[in-house]
Amino acid sequence: MTEFRYLKDVVTLTCDQDKCIGCGMCAVVCPHAVFTIAGKKAQMVRRNLCMECGACMKNCPAGAITVEAGEGCVRGIINELLGIEGPCC
Ligand code: SF4
Ligand code: SF4
C-alpha cells in the first residue's frame, strides 16, 4: 500500500475571510476535506493536506480562495506508475 507523506507549510492555499460568504462549496468539492464551515465562514482545518488541485478556487463564487494549482498531482501519479521517484499528491 502506498504511504502518503505531507509537508507542513508549503501549500500555497489561502482563503480571504472577508470575501467568504459561507456557501460551503469549498467543503463540498475538496477531495481532502481541507475546509469546514464554522460561523458562516470557511475554515481551513487541514490546510497541509491540500494537493493544490484548484477545485475550491474554481468553485468559490466569491473569489475568496487562491491556490497555485498546477500539474503536480498528475505528474506525481504518472511518476508513481512509472516507478520514478518524485512528488505525489
Ligand atoms: S466556496 Fe468561497 S465563499 Fe463559499 S464557503 Fe468556501 S471560501 Fe467561502
Ligand atoms: S486546492 Fe484542491 S485539495 Fe486544496 S483545498 Fe482546494 S479543493 Fe482541496
Image (tube, helix red, strand yellow):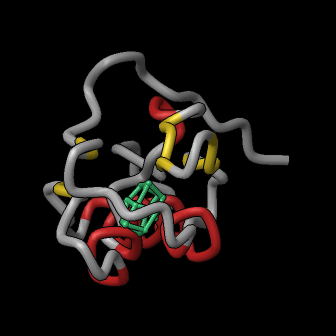
Left or right: residue 77 versus residue 14 is right
* Near-viewer residue (30 or 36): 36
Residue 28 x, y percent position in the rendering: 64, 73
Relative to 18, say whether 78 is above or below. below
Residue 42 x, y percent position in the rendering: 48, 49
* Near-viewer residue (51 or 61): 61
* Near-viewer residue (75 or 27): 27
**Ligand 2 located in image quadrant:** bottom left
Q: Looking at the image, which residue is at 48% across and 48% down?
A: 41
Q: Looking at the image, which residue is at 38% across and 64% down?
A: 21
Relative to 5, say whether 36 is above or below. below
Q: Quadrant of residue 66?
A: bottom left
How many numbered circles does the render carry?
Answer: 0
Q: Looking at the image, which residue is at 47% across and 30% down?
A: 48
Residue 84 x, y percent position in the rendering: 40, 53
Left or right: residue 38 versus residue 81 is right
Q: Looking at the image, which residue is at 28% across and 60% down?
A: 72
